[in-house]
Amino acid sequence: MTAMNRGRKHVGIIVSVPGVLAGVMSVAAFCAVSACPAAANEATTAPTTQPAKEEVMLTICYDNNPGRENLKPAWGFACVVRGLEKTILFDTGGDGRTLLANMKALDVQLAEIDLVVISHIHGDHTGGLWDFLQARGGVPVYMPAGFPAAFGERIEKLGGKAIVADESTAVCEGAKTTGTMGKGQIEEHGLCVQTPVGWALITGCAHPGIAHMAERATRLVESPLNLVVGGFHMGGASRQQVEAVIEQLEKLGVATVAPCHCSGDNTRKLFKEHCGKSYTAACVGTSLRFPSQEHGEEPRPSSP
Ligand SMILES: [Zn+2]
Ligand SMILES: [Zn+2]
């Protein structure tokens, strides 16, 4: 159990996976299940800011892991963050038509989206941006360093504002980028999101390494992460390699994980085996809800 969670009664994340009954994950489960005695104590400092008060919800609207029937699975990743000061679209999948159709099917209105964060240059994360901007109209688009100038110019042509987030950048109250990682290679950043029960890290492909990104995020938010969700980029990783990453995440005090997109089927299987209840099988349409802890509210299931 991490110090972050000590003394809290019933804190959890509600998971709505299409076709699967919603479940509650204990935020302390990751370490408890995988028996890592010293894990939590190494990365525990008090958060510098007050936790978010309102419910925060992450909805995966683009992923290659299939969900319910009216959502199209396709290679790539996109996730909508709701409940903060601004509504954020993190990545845009590979294809605009699929992104917009899935958003509609998931009841995400285009007008809701206040800003976009692009994780890295690969087409399966940027491909939907142009159709999105055309349909939504210009919004700020945060991207890591190292993008070609033409990318920013194209955003501006569609009325958007291209913002390079080299260092960690607050995109709104309760959400900040990790800062650009993987300099000189595949440059990428993740997004740290503050929820009522701790911080979540969302990654696109995690090319700089998922443990490395989680470590950066943990240092940045000065607290163990409640959740790491997104692409872990570990397709083809050996059991040994996966177990080493799990161990690193445990040491950081990560409470729950939801690897999807490019994480690899075998990697997901190993995470599931090892992490038990603190693992979520995320796919297109998965919603992760962090209910408000005000007034001792109990988590409620929600329909996807
Ligand atoms: Zn990818
Ligand atoms: Zn990639």
Image (cartoon, helix red, strand yellow):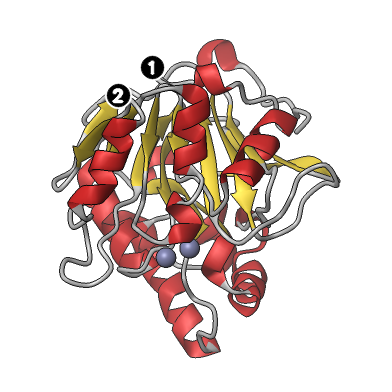
Q: Which mark is residue 85?
A: 1
- Whether 59 is drawn above or below 72: the answer is above
Residue 203 place in picture, x, y as percent: 42, 54
- Whether 70 is drawn above or below 255: the answer is above
The quadrant in which residue 207 appears is: bottom left
Specify the quadrant that holds the C terminus: top right
The quadrant in which residue 120 appears is: bottom left
The quadrant in which residue 212 appears is: bottom left
Q: Residue at x 55, y 23 (%)?
A: 110
Q: Residue at x 62, y 36 (%)?
A: 100
**Identity, as a three-letter code, of the amino acid under mark 2:** Cys
- In this rendering, does residue 87 appear at all? yes
- Residue designated by label 2: 172
Pick the residue in front: 78 or 46: 78
User: Is residue 262 found left or right of 39 in the rendered image?
Assistant: right
Pick the residue in front: 41 or 298: 298
User: Is residue 97 found left or right of 216 in the rendered image?
Assistant: right
Residues under numbered marks 1 and 2 in contact, where contact means CB atoms less than 8 Å apart: yes
